[in-house]
């Protein structure tokens, strides 16, 4: 359990945040300038807050009321910086082992061989940092932070400086870290696609304040909480299982709680768990089962609520077998279809973002 | 041995003495040089400009003035000189130790300057990263900062050594020109030039000076390259 309640002024900018999270990977999400980096720097001890308290589990890192502020090196907070920051005068292996010696034996839980295997960096050990690619450097930086056996791992936009190919290279490792490592992660990002793929929980920051905090699938549906330019990316996040492959039409069927979805053939074994995202702008609403429509994925559900947004938009929350799909429609459509809570509808899914092995979006019409 | 290079005993004595004086001057002033460079590069305190001025003063003052100031301060009658002699038995006046002190003071600004520049070039974000990995400030300095500024320390050391080998004005003013005790290479060359028929000795010692300076440069270049390889290109 991680908890934070701080106020900090920096020039004209005021950060005033309060949230708790017990998630394995909590994303700090917000546009640049929303205070994300300041917040993680406060957690790491690189910035001392004007007021507040930060604790990881039972361990209090900062409590201004008690005049307590652990120095950086005694916090045991791993930090993966956007710019790797590997020590240029040490080999990869020396970089990795740097934190180990500062930790008492009894408190070391990260094992060198295991971390090297987890991140796939065994072939790099003898190299110098300047002989690594951007993606490799970032993996080594993650390994170095992990090997200090931290109680919390901070990752400040670790992918921001990388191109799409390098991002796709690192993302699976971050997923493994989330699922296999014994350390909770606080992950800073301004990319919703990344957050929806990785995060179990998310905190939305805007202008130095927390706009929303909670489980990722719940927050992703609240399009109004997302920054305006990212609202189109919001929607339903569903966990699914690869059910079968249809070889005739080269399709893959994925079972989600909301219903079965058919996607272009995926390279994944049946039984494999996948996380998919259905963006609100990719969902149409029909009051009767559509005929003569190319869309493959039509899911039955019931309107739960309708929430008007700025301008012409309305977000329709559709209950499908206990899961919620979100459709962004116009107010005019709402009126024409006479939509209201409780009304049975059909959600037509135009495309599915499939957050595994890259952040591809498949049109399924 | 003595015939090698055709150096006479007095000339050899001067060479050996100069090396001893310069090595001691550099070795003893190096920790202070690193500390002062750190203070000037990183410190925020009242009187920083004053400290900076004081360190650089010997570079600008006439060496004779520096030598005379040392004589006033560290001579037998000087406040610091009498204190050190009584408390620790360290005497500078008319001893080789005085020559080393004069050489250290004259070389100090060069040493501090080179080290300070290299400290200012260190990416402090690397030090932050080391802190998050559990290293306390001293460990961060020893394992990250120090290795990264090593080329600067080497450059500063060589500069100070070269300055110490060539220091003349302050040395001769402070501790005079006593063969075997304070007669360093430059003093010996000066002495040779004062007596008829001394040009031969002066010329030979000049050759030795050039050789030592070249050797120091080559060694430092080699060490800097090795340190540079360890530190990587970035």
Image: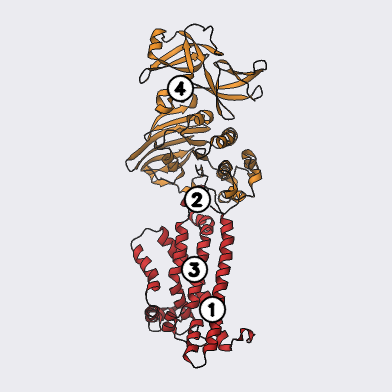
For the residues beneath circles 4 and 2, the answer to whether they share a chain is: no
Report the Cα–Cα distance between label 1 and label 4.
Answer: 80 Å
| Chain letter for the part of the structure drawn in orange | A
Image location (x, y in percent) of residue B149: 51, 59
In the displayed structure image, the side of residue B11 where residue A331 appears, left or right: left
Q: Nearer the viewer, mark 3 or mark 1?
A: 1
Q: Residue at x 38, y 40 (%)?
A: A52
Secondary structure under badge 2? helix
Chain at tag 2: B
Chain at tag 4: A
Q: Check residue B209 in the rendering and tell me which mark sits there, or answer none.
A: 1
Q: Nearer the viewer, mark 2 or mark 1?
A: 1
| Chain letter for the part of the structure drawn in red | B
| Residue A118: quadrant of the picture | top right
Location of mark 3 (residue): B30
Q: Label 3 near label 2: C-beta < 8 Å?
A: no
Chain at tag 1: B
Mark nearer the N terminus (2 vs 1): 2
Q: Check residue B126 in the rendering and tell me which mark sits there, or answer none.
A: 2
Q: Residue furthest left?
A: A12
Mark nearer the N terminus (3 vs 1): 3
Location of mark 4 (residue): A221
Q: Residue at x 64, y 47 (%)?
A: A125
Q: Label 4 near label 3: C-beta < 8 Å?
A: no
**How many C-alpha atoms fall within 10 Å of the one at disc 3: few (<14), some, or many (≥20)?**
many
């Amino acid at each position: 359990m991680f908890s934070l309640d701080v106020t900090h002024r920096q020039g004209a900018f005021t950060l005033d945040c309060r949230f708790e999270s017990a998630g394995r990977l909590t994303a700090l999400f917000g546009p640049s300038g929303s205070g994300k980096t300041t917040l993680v720097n406060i957690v790491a001890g690189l910035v001392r807050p004007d007021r507040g308290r930060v604790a990881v589990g039972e361990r209090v890192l900062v409590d201004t009321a008690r005049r307590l502020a652990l120095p950086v090196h005694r916090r045991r907070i791993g930090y993966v910086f956007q710019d790797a920051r590997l020590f240029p005068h040490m080999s990869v292996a020396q970089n990795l082992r740097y934190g180990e010696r500062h930790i008492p034996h009894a408190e070391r839980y990260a094992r060198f061989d295991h971390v090297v295997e987890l991140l796939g960096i065994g072939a790099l050990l003898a190299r110098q940092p300047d002989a690594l690619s951007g993606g490799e450097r970032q993996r080594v930086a993650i390994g170095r932070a992990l090997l200090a056996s931290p109680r919390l791992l901070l990752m400040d936009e670790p992918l921001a400086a990388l191109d799409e190919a390098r991002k796709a290279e690192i993302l699976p490792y971050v997923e493994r870290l989330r699922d296999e490592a014994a350390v909770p992660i606080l992950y800073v990002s301004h990319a919703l696609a990344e957050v929806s793929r990785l995060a179990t929980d998310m905190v939305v920051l805007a202008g130095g304040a927390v706009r929303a905090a909670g489980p990722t699938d719940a927050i992703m549906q609240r399009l109004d909480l997302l920054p305006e330019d990212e609202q189109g990316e919001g929607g339903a996040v569903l966990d699914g299982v690869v059910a079968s492959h249809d070889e005739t039409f080269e399709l893959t069927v994925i079972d989600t709680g909301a219903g079965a979805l058919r996607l272009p053939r995926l390279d994944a074994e049946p039984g494999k768990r996948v996380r998919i995202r259905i963006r609100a702008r990719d969902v149409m609403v029909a009051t009767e089962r559509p005929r003569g429509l190319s869309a493959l994925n039509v899911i039955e559900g019931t309107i739960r609520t309708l929430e008007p947004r700025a301008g012409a938009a309305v977000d329709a929350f559709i209950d499908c077998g206990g899961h919620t799909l979100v459709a962004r429609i116009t107010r005019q459509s709402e009126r024409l279809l006479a939509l209201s809570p409780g009304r049975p509808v059909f959600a037509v899914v135009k495309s599915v973002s499939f957050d595994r092995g890259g952040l591809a979006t498949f049109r399924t019409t | 041995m003595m015939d090698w290079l055709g150096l006479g005993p007095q000339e050899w004595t001067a060479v050996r003495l100069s090396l001893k004086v310069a090595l001691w001057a550099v070795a003893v002033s190096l920790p202070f040089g690193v500390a002062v460079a750190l203070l000037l590069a990183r410190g925020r305190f009242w009187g920083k400009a004053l400290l900076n001025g004081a360190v650089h003063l010997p570079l600008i003052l006439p060496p004779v003035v520096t030598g005379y100031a040392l004589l006033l301060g560290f001579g037998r009658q000087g406040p610091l000189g009498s204190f050190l002699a009584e408390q620790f038995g360290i005497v500078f006046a008319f001893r080789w130790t005085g020559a080393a002190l004069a050489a250290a003071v004259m070389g100090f600004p060069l040493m501090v300057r080179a080290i300070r520049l290299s400290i200012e070039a260190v990416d402090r974000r690397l030090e932050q990263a080391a802190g998050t990995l559990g290293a306390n400030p001293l460990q961060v300095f020893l394992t990250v900062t120090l290795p990264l500024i090593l080329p600067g320390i080497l450059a500063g050391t060589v500069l100070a050594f070269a300055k110490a080998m060539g220091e003349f004005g302050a040395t001769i003013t402070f501790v005079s020109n006593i063969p075997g005790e304070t007669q360093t290479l430059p003093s010996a060359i000066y002495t040779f030039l004062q007596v008829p028929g001394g040009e031969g000795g002066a010329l030979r010692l000049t050759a030795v000076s050039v050789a030592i300076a070249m050797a120091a440069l080559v060694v430092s270049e080699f060490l800097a390259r090795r340190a540079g390889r360890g530190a990587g290109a970035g």
